[in-house]
Amino acid sequence: MPPFFDHALRLTWMALLGCWLWSARSAKKATQQESLWIRICVCWLPLLVAMLLLGPGPWFGHSLLREQFVPHSTFVYSLGLGLAVCGATLAIYSRFLLGRNWSATVQLKQSHELITRGPYRMVRHPIYTGLLLLFLGNALMVGDWRGLLAVAIVFASFWRKLRVEESWLAAHFGESYSDYKSQTKPLIPAVL
């Protein structure tokens, strides 16, 4: 990958992680959360595997994972970087709107609020949408099948996580969450 695109992608990830770490300081205390074992195995481990899959190509030798699914070209790098930046921006903005209700794992917070403004008007989990776009953009820039495998792992992890979150939110907010759910899709407006 040309240095400009490599540096821009790294800055995109660093901006996201920096915002996450900075804003996590003011999150409300949890009143309910999954066990540590489930958080590690079902949330953090898949993300770690996905990040490793997007790591340096030489790690994967001459395996099928290193086979290209798109050409290494300026157009593909630009498209991938555009998706990554859009995804990070959506995730950061959505995280900002959640405010103190945000958590990295499945949790209910003290005085938990249902947020339905901004991108939450169109999808129930715009942070996941943004992160999936970021991973997809990164995968395009890598250009190898390992990138698509990373996206599939992240999608499966997020899909499981959002199903648990939705059951907890439905139990907590009752009919107001059911109404909200009937008007929005989980990840992609009007599609999924």
Image (cartoon, helix red, strand yellow):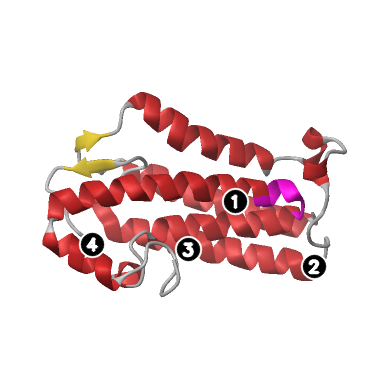
What residue appears at the point 63 percent right and 60 percent down from the top-left corner?
137
Considering only order in the chain, which callout, 2 or 4, is on the residue closer to the N terminus? 2
Residue 143 image offset from top left, x and y in percent: 76, 55
| Furthest residue toward top | 37
Considering only order in the chain, which callout, 2 or 3, is on the residue closer to the N terminus? 2
Residue 112 image offset from top left, x and y in percent: 16, 50
Disc nearest the viewer among 3 and 1: 1
Task: Tell me the kind of residue under disc 2.
Answer: Thr
Considering only order in the chain, which callout, 4 or 1, is on the residue closer to the N terminus? 4
Disc nearest the viewer among 1 and 2: 1
Question: SS for tag 3?
Answer: helix
Task: Tell me the kind of residue under disc 4.
Answer: Ile
Tell me the distance, in whole angstroms, between the alpha carbons under discs 1 and 4. 27 Å
Q: Is residue 8 visible?
A: yes
What residue did someone put label 2 on?
74
Q: Residue 31 magenta-drawn? A: no
What residue did someone put label 3 on?
89
Question: SS for tag 1?
Answer: helix
Residue 28 image offset from top left, x and y in percent: 20, 42
Q: Is residue 116 left or right of residue 55?
A: left
Disc nearest the viewer among 4 and 2: 4
Tell me the distance, in whole angstroms, between the alpha carbons under discs 3 and 1. 18 Å
Tell me the distance, in whole angstroms, between the alpha carbons under discs 3 and 2. 22 Å
What residue did someone put label 1 on?
151
What residue appears at the point 75 percent right and 40 percent down from the top-left corner?
56
> Would you identify the image quadrant in which residue 50 lies?
top right
From which residue to which does the magenta span run?
143-148
Task: Tell me the kind of residue under disc 3.
Answer: Thr
